[in-house]
Amino acid sequence: MRIEEDVKLDFKDVLIRPKRSTLSSRKEVDVSREYVFKWSERKFKGVPIIAANMDSVGTMEMARVFAATGQGLGVALHKHYSLEQLIEFYEKNGNENVWYSIGVSEKDEEKLDAFLSSDIQKQGQGIDKLCIDVANGYSEPFVEFVRRIRSKLPDVTIMAGNVVTGEMVEELVLSGADIVKVGIGPGSVCTTRKMTGVGYPQLSAIIECADAAHGLKGFVCADGGCAVPGDIAKAFGGGADFVMLGGMLAGHDQSEGKIIKGKDGKQYMAFYGMSSSTAMEKHAGGVAEYRASEGKTVQVPYRGDVRDSLQDILGGLRSACTYVGAVTLKELSKRTTFVRVTQQLNTIFGND
């Protein structure tokens, strides 16, 4: 047993210090980025925000709306769509802004192989971005899986995770991941930290993991913990290359869920973690006897069309850039100085 005594920070623990700027308007800020990926050698240009591969967020309808914005926003489609649904979607909508998501089960790989054998894949309109998603990215079988998929798909951009420490980011990048997903337990409907005691404050995880990835020409995607647009700005300010959103995109028309009328007369939609009993009951017939639920189910206010929320998210991000004088999103991390806030301030801001 050992104790690390270095201070580790979450989004609520800091604010971004403003700096003098020559910018006169938010519209002068470019919140897109351009990357070339280490292994696939493919290029990305657009706003590096991705809808999480949760079945109430990473939906096909969400992907259609994101594509219609023309800004390069991405959606990681949840893995519970059938092969037929996925092939039909790619045929009609293309692959420009979608990530095909899988776990590491034999069933997941079999479905992936079937898609790769389809006509749409042979025509070059199929999978070009793959998200390999597990709760615990520290297992050796997961690393071996990433290596095998990289060998099988040398020209596909691979995002893999989740991890929270630099040495594991390096391992995954060297094993074939172009992007490593960072985050264990920070999500609003994730209970991993309560159930297992395992986790890492998200902002420090982003800072440390980005430093490790960038040294190897890899990238990181901050996954979880963003509750407001300011948190997204902090994630990018800390060095994240991409930010994945769950709860901030839940409760919309594109969530493919039922609208529920609450006791207060207001409208709500269900939002739950993919390791929750709700998700496991829906997709696996229940919680397996060897595991426990590590997610919860909540009712989020119904928010209508996601386009309005996207405007708030991107508007907040542009505004953050103007406060520090960053003309482009790329400059934000270079212009960011974090100021630690006291517990008293956290109480005032409602961040306890």
Image (tube, helix red, strand yellow):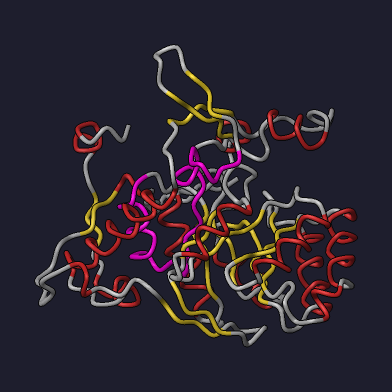
- Please indicate whether residue 78 sits to the left or right of residue 140 in the image: left
- Please indicate whether residue 171 sits to the left or right of residue 18 in the image: right
For the C terminus, the image quarter is top left
- Residue found 52% across the figure and 47% down from its top: 246
- Please indicate whether residue 284 sits to the left or right of residue 161 in the image: right
Decide if residue 9 is in sight here: no
Residue nearest the observer in this picture, 323 or 14: 323
Residue nearest the observer in this picture, 299 or 280: 299
Residue nearest the observer in this picture, 173 or 283: 283
Does the magenta portion include 233?
yes
Above or below — where is 116 with respect to 296?
below
Q: Report the number of numbered marks.
A: 0
Please, which residue is most extreme toward the bottom here? Answer: 41
- Residue 348 quadrant: top left
- Residue 266 quadrant: top left
Which segment did they paint magenta? 228-256
Decide if residue 69 is in sight here: yes
- Residue found 21% across the figure and 75% down from its top: 28
Above or below — where is 16 with respect to 214?
above
Q: Where is residue 270 drawn, in percent x and y?
A: 56, 30
Does the magenta portion include 153?
no
Q: Where is residue 117 drawn, in percent x and y?
A: 89, 73
Q: Where is residue 99 drawn, in percent x and y?
A: 64, 65
- Residue 346 quadrant: top left
Above or below — where is 317 with respect to 21?
above
Q: Where is residue 103 drawn, in percent x and y?
A: 76, 55
